[in-house]
Amino acid sequence: MSGILTRNCVATVIIQQLFNGLALGMAYALIAVGYSLVFGILRLINFSHGAVYAFSAHIALLFVGLNFGIIPAIILSIVLTGILGVLIDKTALEPLRMNNSIPMASLITTIGMSNIIQNLLMIFFNTERKSFPAFFDFGMIKFGSVQVNSTQVVMFVVSLILLVFLTLIINKTKLGLAMRATEQNSKAASLMGINTNFVISATFFLGGASAAIAGVLISGYYQIVYPGMGFMVGLKAFAAAVLGGIGVLYGSVVGGLVVGVSESYAATFMGSSYRDSVAFIILILVLIIRPTGLFGKKDIKKV
Amino acid sequence: MDKNLEKGKSKNFILILESFIEKYKVPIAGVSALILLGLPFMGFSQYIMRIFIMIGIYSMLALGLNILTGYTGLVSLGHAGFYAIGAYTASLLSLKLGANFLVAAIGGAVLAAICGLLVSLPTLRLKGTYLSIVTLGFGEIVKMILINWDKVTNGTLGLKNIPRPSMFGLKLTLVNNGMYYLMLVLVALITLLCTLLIKSKIGRAFMSIKEDELAAIMMGIKTTRYKALAFVISAFITGITGAFYASMIGFIEPNSFTFDISTLIISIVIFGGMGTIRGMFLGSAILIAFPEVFRFLMDYRFVVYGLVLVLMMRFRPQGMLGWKSQMPYKLPKLVKESLKKNNKDNLKTQQI
């Protein structure tokens, strides 16, 4: 009798953690999309993305504190974070592209930018952990013996809608077409009359906006905000993007889900200190077996 | 037109500087050696001496990474991992087995080098950014092992009371400046190692891999072997530095080896000038001293630090001292001798 009961418990925990992981993973996927889009076009790891994510959460908190109401605060945060993304591109990265400088230079520039953003956040918002309103908490939803927090459902659904929306933008609109063209060959694209600099800025805006939504969702879930929050989440989302094949949108989603689910399983079954590294172990294993990630395209090099 | 002229001028300036250094090699080396040896007697406070030692440590780290990134063109974002392995292994050897500093340091360095070999194995398949990602993951995994392997590494509490090195019955400390001189010796040895390595056949192979890997393969260079070798040497140097750091600071914990350290090392390499040895010293001196010197900027100093990196990449991406040598290429001795011989033979035939 008791054996059956414990087995039931284990099953419940497994399913429960699956839901936790899926919700978190979808939010990771949103951040991962930002990495993936930028990498696809510029072949650049954008290390400032984690800081951008932290920025979005702080801006949302600021406007909530100013009594703007939740929805306007979120919208303002999305727009401002998108603009921050464009600013990063315009001030720091575009001049480098003009100079045809080495790829490492842009990498270091993004590290410098993340340093600047994170430390400015520390100056203006203090380093302490601030509580964030749990604004989409409608209590628990029960599926049999499994309880799911409504926050998680909202996270999952909102992220899913946004990812579908992003996919539609990239596959169906003119801007998306321009983005794909720039990704394949930016020189040829600009010869075809595509303003590649505008396209790249638009990409940064999309990446920043999706990071902002993820920022609001994840901070609403953990109910905590601090300037260094972007670092680990950024690395994990990055791992997710690479895992699925960087530059491939649905790859980021799969990667985000794998990272999210494995993280919540690791936290329950191996201890919370393993939480942050599981993503990297999976990442390295995948990279050794398939160097371009699960769904990545192979680069063909002509001699 | 003007720009060209300016370029010509700056080249000339470098040429003048280089020929000046070449001409007065011995006095310049002597004076700088005297200054470095005499630093402890100039009445600096403990705090400043500590900064000097940190500059030395980061010079060594940068020299190690420079072999990999500057000369071979493989970008590592996980050097904090090798640093941590060196530090932990050496401290554990000296804490649990009571090993001498030298033995412990070499033990740490060897383990770091073995890990370097392991990390380099995926490089057989990965290129460019993907390789950087694997090294990044490596750094995080090392940190995770340090946190979770409680029995050996003492988890998040870290290792305490790491013994200071003692040599010839003399205990080296910060107070008697022993650590400073040990740092100088280590920096000198590692610089010598790097210089010799770069001037040798191995160094030329590294550089050819950086310039064009395909062409290097065509020239008969076994690139995978040399890439692995670059990883091993780089990790070895980083491991030794880790051992020294642990015994200097006396206390290490997993959070002393974060991703920030890796980015700091790579920033130094790029700031100073990739693929130069002189740049590493200037880079670490500026980037390490910067937050200390600009304390009056308070919280803004790290913002300025980021700005410096961004502006640097914008206006001088080759690094502070990253110029190509303008001096005529020096032929190796044997080549020179054989040339002379040939010339003599030619002269003889002409005379006849």
Image (cartoon, grey):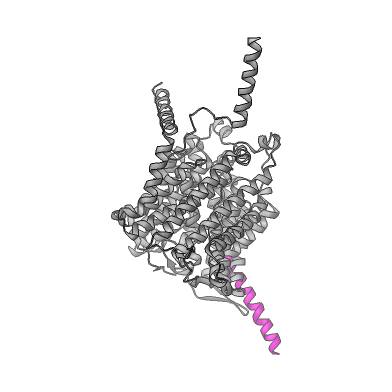
Residue A2 drawn at (x, y percent): 68, 89
- Can you say which quadrant of the picture contains the N terminus of chain A? bottom right
Quadrant for residue A172, please give it.
top right
The prevailing secondary structure element of the residues shown in magenta is helix
Rendered residue at 38%/62% (across/down) = B176
Horizontal placement of A233 versus A226: left or right?
right
Q: Is residue B222 left or right of residue A80?
A: right
Q: Position of residue A239 (x, y in %)?
A: 58, 57
Closest to the observer, B176 or B13: B176
Residue range (magenta): A1-24
Q: Residue at x 54, y 30 (%)?
A: B330
Q: Which of A153 and A220 lies nearest the eye of the viewer? A: A220
User: Which residue of the protein is positioned furthest toward the bottom in this rendering?
Assistant: A1
Q: Is residue B91 above or below residue B210?
A: below
- Position of A204 with respect to A8 (left or right) is left
Residue A133 pos. (x, y %)? 41, 69
In the rendered image, which quarter is residue A73 located in?
A: bottom left
Q: Residue furthest left?
A: B296
Asked whether residue B79 is in view, the answer is yes
Is residue A22 within the magenta segment?
Answer: yes
Label tally: 0
Quarter of the figure that contains the C terminus of chain A: top right
Q: Is residue B185 magenta?
A: no
Front residue of A271 and A124: A271
Say if residue B70 shows up in the picture.
no
Residue A36 location (% of width, % of height): 57, 50
